[in-house]
Amino acid sequence: TGLSVSILGDPGDLAYIVKCVHAKGYITIDHLVPMVFASLFSMVGGGPIGPEPPLVAICACIAGFISRNLFKQRNRNMIRKHTLMGMGAALAALFGCPLGGPLFALEVNSRFGIEYFEHTVETVFSATVSVMVMRFLSGG
């Protein structure tokens, strides 16, 4: 893990993810490759990290990238909504619960009570679609 961080750069942690979501509405794509390799080497090496934090960071990064480049969004609030939808969908697919994942994704980004409540419906919808796709692909 240390070697991948020294070669590829610092992938950031949950505090960095929350800071990016608040400041810019997205996580830069520069953190995708370091996060993938640092989390992969940590999990394979028996590190104490679970799959949740890297999955949230990777899906948030990809969702923000798609929002800015594919949908050509420039509105920070819209990009933030797509980023939160990606985070909620990732957690919902991992846990198999279309309500718990998005609520956790919204809660972890809230500093002062409920902060992004206006994105709840869209985040729960993306999580529900994510769980349905995951169950269809896994045959369950």
Image: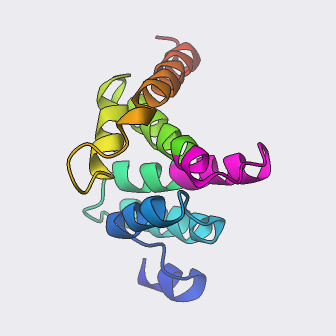
Q: Residue at x 49, y 21 (%)?
A: 125
- In the rendered image, residue 5, in percent from the top left (x then y), is placed at 49, 82
Does the stretch in magenta take in 75? yes
* Magenta-drawn stretch, dominant element (helix, strand or loop): helix
Q: Please give left or right for residue 85 compared with residue 46 in the image.
A: right
Name of the residue lying farthest toward the bottom: 6
Name the foreground residue: 96 vs 43. 96
The image shows a total of numbered marks equal to 0
Name the foreground residue: 106 vs 62. 106
Does the stretch in magenta take in 65? yes
- In the rendered image, residue 136, in percent from the top left (x then y), is placed at 56, 13
Name the foreground residue: 125 vs 96. 125
Q: Residue at x 46, y 26 (%)?
A: 127
Question: With respect to residue 122, does 33 lie above or below?
Answer: below
Quarter placement of the N terminus: bottom left
Do we see residue 94 in this rendering? no
Q: Residue at x 55, y 58 (%)?
A: 26
Question: With respect to residue 136, does 43 lie above or below?
Answer: below
Question: With respect to residue 45, does 74 lie above or below?
Answer: above
Where are the magenta residues, as a range?
60-80
Q: Residue at x 29, y 65 (%)?
A: 47
- In the rendered image, residue 83, in percent from the top left (x then y), is placed at 53, 47
Name the foreground residue: 71 vs 76. 76
Do we see residue 59 in this rendering? yes
